[in-house]
Amino acid sequence: MAYTDDWESLMNGVFGAGGRVKFGSGAAQPDTKAKTGGLPDLNAALLEQQKQLDELLKKQNAQLKKQDADTQTALENSRQMLRDMENDGLLAKGTADTKPEHLGSFEGLATEVKKTVLGQDAFVDGVVRAMRRPFVLGTEAPVARNVILLSGAPGTGRHFALEETARIMAARGLLQSDKTAVLDLALYPDAGSEKLFLQDLYAALHAPGEILIFEHYESCYPGFLKTIADLATRGSAPLSSRYLVNKEGILVDAGTALAPGAVSRIDPCGKYLIFFSHKGREALADKFGAPFVSAVGDVCTTTAFAREDLAAMAAQELNALAQKVRTRLGLTLTAGADVRDYVAAQCSKEKGAAGLKLCCDRIFRALSEYCLQTDTALTGTVALTAVPEGLQFALNGAAPADLFSLLPTEYTGAVDEIRAELDALVGLAPVKDYVFGLADNLQVQQRRAAAGFKTASLSMHMIFTGNPGTGKTTIARLVAKYLKAIGALKGGQLVEVSRGDLVGRYTGHTAPLTNSVIQSALGGVLFIDEAYSLYRGEQDSFGLEAIDTLVKGMEDHRDELVVILAGYTKEMEGFLTANSGLASRFPNKVEFPDYTADELLDITTVLAKGKGYRLDESCTFPLLGYYKRRQALDSRAAGNGRLARNTLEKAIFNQSRRLVAEPNAPLDLILPSDLEFDE
């Protein structure tokens, strides 16, 4: 730089090029001379040179400060550009603030992940170790970088821990992107979905990012799991047919044509293959086989949250809530340890730690409703307190009020409508009491959760026993609708099947067939009429396979499926012995009593009204006498609604013949002469 030359010139002026002090004309000399020998005053010369040196140093410092300022401005501009790219999704969050010494390094990565992923330190260490493994071993594409199983209960942070690890790795340059591809294997339950499975797998392997997540492998068709196992164990999976890749990146079956560029195998494309499951290594071996499990590089399992971990997580969520309230609502939020503990208690078996965030979201919605009640901007401090009934809030020291009462009341029209439909059914008082009890239990559990208490999940699988025509199918359909209306099920559909829909015709056909039926019923009710027909003795291997598959499906989808078995009382008792775990999974047994003669008369009247007819009062006595006589002869066949339906249909047929001869007679009235009885 320029100041270097100035420095050298100054030093040469004082000492000379040889490093000796100059006394001649080459150095600036004052007129004063020493008394002895007429030599110049050396001190004065040095002082003069020092002054020049100080001025030069000031000039140099000013230049350095300007250079530092320019450097800091350039660095800040660069960071801002990186932040803009983060906001646009082009870079992982945190890239702009990553320290230079951490770029390309795993050092301190687990510690950084633990700042946001709380209560799962050992799991985080395992995930980071699993992601680091291929960097140590030197694994390169196209084989999989690593095969990883992340197991643990729902809501224990498995997905969040992986997301945070990928985000920080991408910010450090250890991954090209923090994007992940997800393949839900439950979407491919049978062999008929092969082409869809291969297309989705190919697309996921070629999607942006270096991580491919597999969900719900337990519900996938076994043949497709073989393809995935080959990716892990062999480094590629052969295809049974040749495929072309169109411009959208979708596989298209090329048939037998020798088309150039056809794809005959699928490679892992150097991705991490990560499996999520609630179960461990043993369940993985049951589905994929031992060679696949041997190829799994790491198994990381979450644990139940400790009380102090939940408290820390609740505090974290409340801090985020406070920032959101300040930004969106303009209010300062305060809360004590009582509110923190209330939020922490929202961690349930079904929701896990996600219950904490859901609770804080609900608090924000309630406070938002309060602000929306006025068109004046609110300011000040809103204080939250926990009480046995829930949470209370107070703005600027006002009297506390119930917080969640601010939220709109839930729509109950569907519930009321279905209850009315159930009430309108003739008889079946014990059945109705049981169904209504389901809603009562769910409501109590919701109240317990809102108050911070633990909740108990209730098994809703049922067995309906009784003679044919006693309303089992009708009640099952209403139960499906009712459970959806009260929030216990998402779909509310009723899938009604029998043995022929579950049991295959050849070896290897039954399990996929049963799994396909289970998949179609998820979110609703699977109703198996004459369920005892599935078990025809110990030699019925196909039937036993269907039962075993059903029991496993109920376990895998315990929160998504309600199974109702129906049949004769005696036969159903024998059926429950077919599988050791069958009886324990159906704790709710509902007996459908035969209809009395009076109830059959009421059913006949209701059916007639539904068809646009009315019974003359004089029909009451003959109908009642007929039903009593039939029940005395055969109560098992006569005490059901089918007898009433058949009797009415015959009466309608006979009435139409009568009306031909009596054109002026009422078109809707059924007379005793229209009745026809099978004695």
Image (tube, helix red, strand yellow):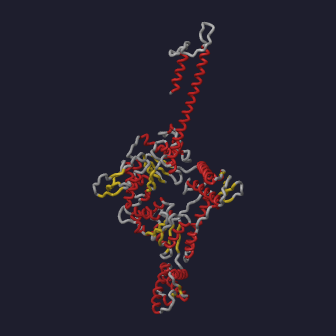
Residue nearest the viewer, comparing 124 with 82: 82
Q: Residue 219's image quarter?
A: bottom left
Q: Residue at the location (30% across, 58% down)?
A: 255
- Residue furthest to the front in view is 31
Q: Position of residue 387 (x, y in %)?
A: 67, 57
Q: Position of residue 606 (x, y in %)?
A: 53, 80
Question: Total number of numbered labels?
Answer: 0
Q: Is residue 307 visible?
A: no
Q: Position of residue 276 (x, y in %)?
A: 47, 52
- Relative to 314, does residue 570 appear above or below in the rendering? below
Q: Position of residue 439 (x, y in %)?
A: 58, 66
Residue nearest the viewer, comparing 308 with 547: 308
Q: Is residue 51 visible?
A: yes
Left or right: 662 as drawn, with respect to 308: left
Q: Residue 499's image quarter?
A: bottom left
Residue nearest the viewer, comparing 632 with 378: 378
Q: Residue at the location (50% across, 76% down)?
A: 470
- Relative to 410, does residue 327 appear above or below in the rendering? above
